[in-house]
Image: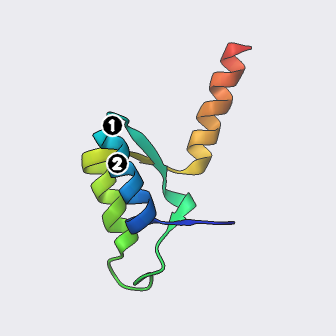
Amino acid sequence: MHRATTSICVESTVRDATFRDYRCIVLRDCTTELIAADAPRSNHEASLLAIELLFGWTADSEAVIGALAEQRAAAE
């Protein structure tokens, strides 16, 4: 599975989207941070917190997939 770096690629994209009036949902378990990943406080967690507080929402992929499945079932 390919993962995007949370504190660079993902956070930059979410910030840019916010400037264009989008509100993003970042899937916490689909991004990662290799820099200081084993440190007590990681860039990954810091970026997710900034996104939650300022730019959008975060969720687990299972929750999003479940919500989309419910929406599809309701539409049928």
Name the residue at the left extreme.
Answer: 54
Within-10-Å neighbours for mark 1: few <14, some 14–19, many 20+: few
Residue 67 point in image, percent of width and height: 59, 33
Where in the figure is residue 74, as x and y percent of width and height? Answer: 67, 16
Give the number of the disc on residue 20: 1
Q: Are marks 1 and 2 in contact (CB under 8 Å)?
A: yes
Q: Does 25 appear above or below 30?
A: above
Helix, strand or loop under label 1? loop
**Residue 48: mark:** none
Q: Quadrant of the N terminus?
A: bottom right
Query: Which amino acid lies under the numbered mark 2 shown in the image of this protein?
Result: Asp
The x, y position of residue 57, in whole percent, is: 38, 44
SS for dot 2 = helix
Task: Identify the residue shown where x is 37% and y is 85%.
Answer: 39
What's the amino acid at mark 1? Arg
Q: Please tell me which residue lies in front, 64 or 51.
A: 51
Residue sitting at x 36%, y 67%: 45
Q: How many marks?
A: 2
Residue 44 falls left or right of residue 19: right
54 and 18: which one is in front?
A: 18
Identify residue for label 2.
Answer: 16
Q: Residue at x 38, y 50 (%)?
A: 14
